[in-house]
């Protein structure tokens, strides 16, 4: 057997750069490169290996959590067919990745993590940043990745790499099991030389197949649909990842079956398709909520039915409602007691379309759906209408960006009150135009995610919409964008704190306690003094961004025009009124204190008990 002598780190990089994926006869490298920060746990290993492999690009970032967010955003734009490696040192560098790794797994997005680890020899233990245990010496902080990784391994001997790396790729390229994958490699093992079989480094293609479900179950699903009088489709991220948007349009345009969209599935249909009812769930539109309430058949496509989608298990009130679940993941396909069509969304929809050529919903039902589509568009137009208040209305800010963005641009957001408003309001015209991380709703994703999205979509603009709370948590990847000459436009909305949770707190009777950025009041001993003098404009400029400060939406519109002519990352700042909100149309199960001295809490509890009565078990 031919061998090649390399260090473990060198062998890892050599293997990774020769991995390809192919779907529908389109082939590409699976890894676009490596994000990282070097420390004593990886600089002599992966640092050296990357240094001698310039054809495997290395990007230095400012925060380990940020680099995993960027990798996940990149992979999402690429429909999970390409991603990045993320390497860190042992210790805080490794554990900084945990938050974003959890988000990647929850959202089913492939990211490979290569954290350094403590010495396998144990001779000099405890080393710097080592977590000691009196019960075991075979433990480090990297064990924290186990519950949030779809595959986790520790390489204590060089030859273990030979069988571990194929498993890494099997999971990362699996449409059903993908997520964060952690390969923990001790710092002394990284630099150890070994004669690896040369075959390990040959080009390998991982084929992404399109699987069909059991034929009997498919026929049963077709029968259920044909009997249905009031069906509804809930389109999730799986519709977009499988490139099933065009066949979905063909199917629903002919049959009249209405479509609602989750956060990950928004963009499955263009907003002006007559069958598109828009956002589903807690942040849903009135049409989506009403049609779902009475639906006799729910067809879930690539959705995991989060509580936001199911309105905390109260969305579907028809006592005879049935579910058909199209999903590559068996786990998700069985939810709500549904008929499981385990397979690829595109080929399943093609099969359904062929089998349902003689099926259409009744004219009255079709017209009702189309009326909801039209009336909601009128509502959005009214929200988007220029009012030019100071501070600005968040809905109007969204409208200004939406109306300016083009077909090939991306809007990106993650946490706060912005996602709810964007989910309802944003008019999508492309499957990749709406990019929300809402499975984990992770504050700090936005700017790092914008970096990754722009790297995946260099020909279009990326508009990152971020509140001041998320900005303060993680804005430093602006520096990375400047360093790599990656241009994105960041719209920074300042509402002096945590507006979303402030609104939720108020709705629960707690008056927005602890959600404003204010000084501590010496008299009340509470954080209800004057507003903090945070200069976001100076902060963004200090990191190298081009900054435009605006006072109202008229100035914002001019700033958007200017930003498009700038070839570097640009931050547009605007103050917004946190108390003026886009209305919501559904409740969300957030537990309320059963004992309180405040009347507002008591009233909120009464309403909570009323809403709880609408919850159901779907068996």
Image (cartoon, helix red, strand yellow):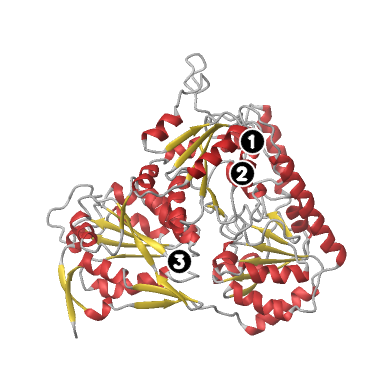
Image-based side of 403 in relation to 442, left or right? right
Residue 214 image offset from top left, x and y in percent = 61, 82
Identity of the residue furthest to the left in this view:
123
Q: Are marks 2 and 3 in contact (CB under 8 Å)?
A: no
Q: Front-most of 227 and 191?
A: 191
Q: Measuring 68% from the left and 29% from the top, which residue is drawn there?
A: 600
Q: Please report contact status of discs 2 and 1: CB closer than 8 Å, yes or no.
A: yes
Numbered disc 2: secondary structure? loop
The secondary structure type at the circle numbered 1 is loop
Residue ranking furthest to the top: 523
Q: CA distance from mark 3 to mark 1?
A: 37 Å
Could you say which quadrant of the image residue 254 lies in? bottom right
Residue found 78% across the figure and 52% down from its top: 374
Reading the image, the residue beneath label 1 is 508
Rendered view: 59 above or below 466: below
User: Residue at label 3?
Assistant: 178
The structure residue drawn at horizontal position 69% and vertical position 50%, both measured from the top left corner, is 284
Image: 259 above or below 613: below
On residue 266, the disc is none
Sooner in the amino-acid sequence: mark 3 or mark 1: 3
Tally of marks:
3
Q: Quadrant of the C terminus?
A: bottom right
Alpha carbon of mark 2 to alpha carbon of mark 3: how far? 30 Å
Q: Residues within 10 Å of mark 1 (few under 14, many from 20)?
A: many
Q: Nearer the viewer, residue 548 or 470?
A: 548
Do the CB atoms of the residues marked 3 and 1 lie less than 8 Å apart? no
Residue 176, percent from left and from top: 50, 70
Residue 593 appears in view:
no
Seen in the picture, residue 351 relative to 105 is either above or below; the reply is below
Residue at far front of view: 565
Q: Earlier in the sequence, mark 2 or mark 1?
A: 1
Q: Name the residue that disc number 2 marks.
A: 590
């Amino acid at each position: 057997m031919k061998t090649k002598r390399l260090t473990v780190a060198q062998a890892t990089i050599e293997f990774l750069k020769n991995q390809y994926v192919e779907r529908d006869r389109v082939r590409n490298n699976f890894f676009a490169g490596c994000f990282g920060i070097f420390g004593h746990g990886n600089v002599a290993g992966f640092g050296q290996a990357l240094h001698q492999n310039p054809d495997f690009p290395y990007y230095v970032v400012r925060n380990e959590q940020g680099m995993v967010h960027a990798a996940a955003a990149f992979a999402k734009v690429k429909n999970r067919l390409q991603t990045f490696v993320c390497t860190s040192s042992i210790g805080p560098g490794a554990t900084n990745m945990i938050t974003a790794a959890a988000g990647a797994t929850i959202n089913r997005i492939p990211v490979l993590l290569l954290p350094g680890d403590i010495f396998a020899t144990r001779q000099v233990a405890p080393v710097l940043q080592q977590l000691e245990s009196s019960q075991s010496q075979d433990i480090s902080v990297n064990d924290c990745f186990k519950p949030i990784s779809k595959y986790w391994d520790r390489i204590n001997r060089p030859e273990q790499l030979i069988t571990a790396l194929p498993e890494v790729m099997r999971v990362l390229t699996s449409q059903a099991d993908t997520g964060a994958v952690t390969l923990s490699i001790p710092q002394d093992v990284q630099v150890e030389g070994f004669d690896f079989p040369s075959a390990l480094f040959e080009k390998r293609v991982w084929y992404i197949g399109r699987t069909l479900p059991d034929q009997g179950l498919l026929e049963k699903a077709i029968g259920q649909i044909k009997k249905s009088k009031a069906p509804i489709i809930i389109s999730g991220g799986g519709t977009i990842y499988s490139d099933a948007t065009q066949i979905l349009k063909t199917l629903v345009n002919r049959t009249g079956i209405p479509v609602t969209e989750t956060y990950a599935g928004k963009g499955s249909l263009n907003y002006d398709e007559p069958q598109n009812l828009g956002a589903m769930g807690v942040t849903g539109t009135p049409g989506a909520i009403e049609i779902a309430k009475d639906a006799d058949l729910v067809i879930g496509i690539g959705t995991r039915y989060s509580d936001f989608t199911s309105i905390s298990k109260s969305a579907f009130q028809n006592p005879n409602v049935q579910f058909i679940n199209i999903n590559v993941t068996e786990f998700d396909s069985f939810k709500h007691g549904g008929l499981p069509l385990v397979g690829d969304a595109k080929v399943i929809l093609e099969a359904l379309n062929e089998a349902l050529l003689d099926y259409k919903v009744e004219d009255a039902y079709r017209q009702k759906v189309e009326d909801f589509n039209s009336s909601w568009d009128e509502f959005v137009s009214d929200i988007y209408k220029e009012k030019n208040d100071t501070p600005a209305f968040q809905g109007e800010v969204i409208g200004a960006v939406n109306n300016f963005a083009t077909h090939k641009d991306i809007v990106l957001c993650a946490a706060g009150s912005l996602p709810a408003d964007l989910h309802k309001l944003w008019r999508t015209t492309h499957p990749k135009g709406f990019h929300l991380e809402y499975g984990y709703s992770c504050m700090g994703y936005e700017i790092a995610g914008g970096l990754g999205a722009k790297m995946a979509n260099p020909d279009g603009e990326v508009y990152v919409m971020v509140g001041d709370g998320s900005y303060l948590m993680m804005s430093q990847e602006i520096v990375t964008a400047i360093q790599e000459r990656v241009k994105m436009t960041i719209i920074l909305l300042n509402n002096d704190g945590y507006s979303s949770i402030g609104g939720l707190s108020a709705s629960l009777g707690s008056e927005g306690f602890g959600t404003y950025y204010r000084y501590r009041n010496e008299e009340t001993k509470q954080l209800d003094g004057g507003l903090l003098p945070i200069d976001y404009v100076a902060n963004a400029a200090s990191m190298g961004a081009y900054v435009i400060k605006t006072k109202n939406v008229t100035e914002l519109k001019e700033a958007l025009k200017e930003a498009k002519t700038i070839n570097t990352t640009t931050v547009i700042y605007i103050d917004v009124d946190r108390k003026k909100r886009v209305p919501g149309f559904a409740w969300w199960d957030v537990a309320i204190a059963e004992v309180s001295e405040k009347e507002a809490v008591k009233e909120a509890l009464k309403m909570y008990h009323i809403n709880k009565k609408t919850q159901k078990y779907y068996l």
